[in-house]
Each structure stands twice: as structure tokens, then as C-alpha cells.
Image (tube, rainbow, N blue to C red):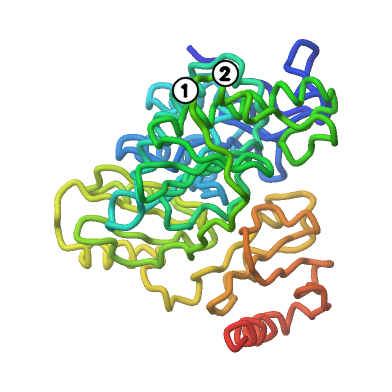
Amino acid sequence: MLAAMPPTPPSPPEAGEPRIRDRGDACPGALRLHAAADGFLARLRLPAGRLTRRQLTVLAGAAEELGDGGLSVTSRGNAELRGLAEGCGGRLAALLDEAGLLPSPTHERVRNIVASPTAGLDGLGHADVQLWARALDAALCAEPRAAALSGRFLFALDDGRGDVTGLGGDVTLVAAPDGAALLTAGSRTFRLPAADAVPAALACALAFLDAADAAGTGAWRPRELPPGHLPDWAGALARAGITAEPVPPFAPPSAPPPAPGPLGDHALHVLAPLGRLTAARLRALGEGAAEVRLTPWRGVVVVLSAPPAVSGRLAALGALGLITDPADPGTGVTACTGTPGCAKSLADVRADAARAPGGPLPVHYSGCERRCGHPHGLRIEVTARDSDTYLLDGAPVPRTALAQAVAAARTRSNES
């Protein structure tokens, strides 16, 4: 049986852990819980956000039995259980293991893989990178050295439409239209056969670990490496037997996230209000689903196992409070946990975000200057300065006037 790890310590881990974590990688996981103001928190890495119907049911039960009754979707398409009681780690680990959500206890915090959530469903893109994600996850878990990656190191797999290229991946793969793939690691880009995409991504991750060990600074991500200690990306690919052609840096494609609504005749996309899914919503999402995919935009792609009317499923999910219409005021509105869940937060940002108007530009509410969970790309930043005042893109706004100020900011962004 899997054993739960102790809560994440504020100081560096014990001696003997990989040098890459000398700075104390405090990212929570499924086995290493994080102590928050509302109880303990577990973060489950879900490569490409994928969950089966049975796994949804298990998570719903775990949320009700052990946590606060819900699940949070993160900006990487992972899942968080909050409000966990002290001492429940062993029971949680057993539930997750039995459901197939912990394929490798030693690697569970490094399975950070985002992939185009609608790949293979809507006829767009050049490759089904969902398959790449599964293969990369298996390769990571099979490589003992990969366990030294930090919980922040991110792989981004884009099918060519450009929806996840802007998510800050440390190793990014973009499918090309001619059976090739473009791999970007640090400032280098390589063109290689799509069949080599997964081993190339793993080779680059291991090259980063070599450079980080040589630097001795405890870097978590390539951008943190000091000058003179950059990874030998080309050499790593060559040693892995991969023929990779260096190409000039390029501007990757960029596309907005999918709008809530139908995705062809057998899939749909809904958004979780402020990224929260109750146990009832989790179970409803699994009804008639072959699988679901949590998205980096706090949404859920539902792939139906049979072709019932997508409109009927959307209506049923909308009745449970999920966002099914792009015009819904909650579209694009995100928030950190805020009070009372986070001791560092200065305000109940989720309550204020729930009153936010919709608009074309995302808006993120943060309880402090750390701005946890913010989306990537252009956005409106709303940050608590104290319980009664927010900073809206740097300008102070009284809490009582916040909704109107956010509406005006979103209108201005649309006009520009």
C-alpha cells in the first residue's frame, strides 16, 4: 500500500534528495500534502488533464469523504483536493492508487504535461497530441532520473493550433503539418520527426537536470539556470539517437482556448465557475463519457462514449451551474483561493470574483501579490491590497466599486 508523505516542509528536504531540490521544492502532490488555512491540500498531476469516468467517481467520493466536497481545476489542468483532515493521507493514497491515479509514487509530482485538450476531436491540428501525452507520461515514470525534476517543470504539447504554446512550457512540442514536430527548449528550437517527439522531450528534460546539477544552484526550471550552465540540448538529442535539425527561433502559433459549447457531434466543453467542481458536478460530467479532460482554462472537455444529443448534455450540465455559453458572465473569470482558505490572502477574492462581469479579456482575482493561479497571456489583474481595497492593473479601487471598474476595464480592452 502506498504511504502518504508528510506535509510539505518550509525548509529544504532531507539530505539525499536530488540536488535540484536544494531550494526546497514545496509544490504539493498527491502524497506530499500542503498545510493550508482550510486544512491540507493535495495536488494531483493529470497528464493532459485526462480522467476516466471511474476516476471521476473516485475523486468525487474522496472529496466528500476526506475534503471539502469539491475539486479545484488548476491553470495546468491538474486537480486539487482541499480541506483535507490531518492524518487522511494514507486513505487518500490508497483511493488514488486503486483508481490508477498514482502510476509511480516516486514520479507523481513531475507528471506535469499539458496538451491541446480538443486534439483529435474537432478536425483541427496536425497530430493527436493526447497520445503523445500518454506516451510521455509513461516514459517519465519509467526513467528513474526524471524523478529529480521539480514539481514546476512543465511539458507543453500543442497539436499545431497554438492553444497551449503560450502556457510557459519548459519543453514545448508543436505538431507540424508534414509529419514533423518542432521542439523548443530554452532558446533553442529543433525540427524532428513526430515519431521522435516523446523521446526528444524526455532527453531535453534530462539535459536540464545535468545542467542544473552542474550549476549547483537548485534551479527548478531552465530559465533559472545561471549563464555558462545552459543545457546541451543538441548533444542530448544526438545521444538519444534523434535526428534533429536546429531551426531559427520562431513565433509559435497562438490561438484562444476553446469556447464553452459543442465540439463536433460527440464532445463538448464546459467551464467550472472559478475553477471549482462539486462532487455532484464531477459525477454528472462522467455520465455517458468515455473520458474527460481538465483544461488549463479551468474547463472540462467531455468526450461522449455514444453520440447522444450534445445539446441535451450541455443543458443538463448548465442546470448544475457549469458554464456552457461563451456569453456567460463567468467566462474568463478566475481567482486564487483567497480567504478563508489561504492564510496569506488579504480578501475573500472568490466572493468578489463571483460578482465579476464577463468580457473578452480574462480577469484574475488575487488575494495577495503572489497572484497564484493566474492565467497566461493578456489579462486584467485584480489584486487585494487589503480587505476593502483592490489594485486593478495597479490602480487602487474600493471593493464597493470593483465590479463596475472591472466592467469598464473589460470594455476598454474590447475596444482596443
Q: Is mark 2 on a helix, strand or loop?
A: helix
Which residue is more in the foreground, 39 or 241?
Answer: 241
Identity of the amino acid at label 1? Ala
Residue 87 — which label?
A: none
On screen, residue 218 versus residue 159, left or right, reads right
Q: Can residue 20 be seen in this view?
A: yes
From the top left corner, tell me how far across and down residue 258 is, in percent.
41, 63
From the top left corner, tell me how far across and down residue 230 is, in percent.
76, 32
Is 393 drawn above or below residue 22 in the view shown?
below
Q: Mark 2 points at which residue?
A: 239
Is 206 drawn above or below residue 404 in the view shown?
above
**Dot 1: within a 10 Å radius of its alpha carbon, few (fewer than 14), some, or many (20 or more) residues?**
some
> Of the residues under marks 2 and 1, which one precedes in the sequence?
1
Residue at image position (32%, 51%) is 285
Q: Mark 1 points at which residue?
A: 139
Q: In which quarter of the image is residue 83?
A: top right
- Looking at the image, how many numbered discs can be counted on the residues? 2
Residue at image position (83%, 25%) is 215
Residue at image position (14%, 55%) is 307
Is 249 drawn above or below residue 58 in the view shown?
below
Quadrant of the rendering where the C terminus is positioned: bottom right
Q: Is residue 79 visible?
A: no
From the top left corner, tell me how far across and down residue 23 is, in percent.
82, 29
Identity of the amino acid at label 2? Arg
Q: Distance between the residues labelled 2 and 1?
A: 17 Å
On screen, residue 10 versus residue 141, left or right, reads right
